[in-house]
Image (cartoon, rainbow, N blue to C red):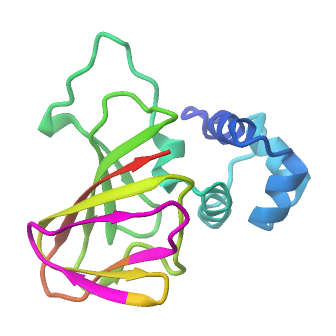
């Protein structure tokens, strides 16, 4: 039912973090039954459920959309990057830079449309995030502080730092980032 094996990937991350289905369901505010069905490929999660699950697991949402590739395909050409666009919203587009989804590293470019943010509520990861402003200006909400970053600036977000990115300008902002889990 699920060509991307989203449920399988959710299960892998959940088990790696030593969480039971019941524990993750409680953290993500979904029913254990629904989570079990998603992991077994019997149900497709809504976008809101995916956001809740990724937040509860402290992983970027696009983690669940990266497909396995052949080991020989180690080069990602700029014109063939996988793009993750959330249904119903093309304001935030992730371009996956790593050729193969890794359990320990996520590497992508986040394209933020003008006057939009990466998410409604701040998120945090179980790893470090390092980001570099490739193009434009970005407002970064880190815990209770707000910082404006400009083209060429970079930042390291410590493990567990609540954060959210905003583009308050009239042009697209591009942020390249790595999350090291």
> Is residue 85 left or right of 169 when viewed as pictured?
right
In the rendered view, would you say 92 is above or below 99?
A: below
Q: Magenta stretch?
A: 146-164
| Residue placed furthest toward the top | 72
Quadrant in the rendering for residue 30: bottom right
Residue 123: x %, y % from top left? 53, 70
In the rendered view, would you say 104 is above or below 174?
A: above
State the residue at coordinates (33%, 55%).
94
Quadrant in the rendering for residue 139: bottom left
In the rendered view, would you say 6 is above or below 165?
A: above
> Is residue 27 left or right of 108 when viewed as pictured?
right
State the residue at coordinates (51%, 55%).
61
Is residue 156 shown in magenta? yes
In the rendered view, would you say 69 is above or below 52?
A: above
Q: Nearer the viewer, residue 59 or 52?
A: 59
State the residue at coordinates (49%, 55%).
60
């Amino acid at each position: 039912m699920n060509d991307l094996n989203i449920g399988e990937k959710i299960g892998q991350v959940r088990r790696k973090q030593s969480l039971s289905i019941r524990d993750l369901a409680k953290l993500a505010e979904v029913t254990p039954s629904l989570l079990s069905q998603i992991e077994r490929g019997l149900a497709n999660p809504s976008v809101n459920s995916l956001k809740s699950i990724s937040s509860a697991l402290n992983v970027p949402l696009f983690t669940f959309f990266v497909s396995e590739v052949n080991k020989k395909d180690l080069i990602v050409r700029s014109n063939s990057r996988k793009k993750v666009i959330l249904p119903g919203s093309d304001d935030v587009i992730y371009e996956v830079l790593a050729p193969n989804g890794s359990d320990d590293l996520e590497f992508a470019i986040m394209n933020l449309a003008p006057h939009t943010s990466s998410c409604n509520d701040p998120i945090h990861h179980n790893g470090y995030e390092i980001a570099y402003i490739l193009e434009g200006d970005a407002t970064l909400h880190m815990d209770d502080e707000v910082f404006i970053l400009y083209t060429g600036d970079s930042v390291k977000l410590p493990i567990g730092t609540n954060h959210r990115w905003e583009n308050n300008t009239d042009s697209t902002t591009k942020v390249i980032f790595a999350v090291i889990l």
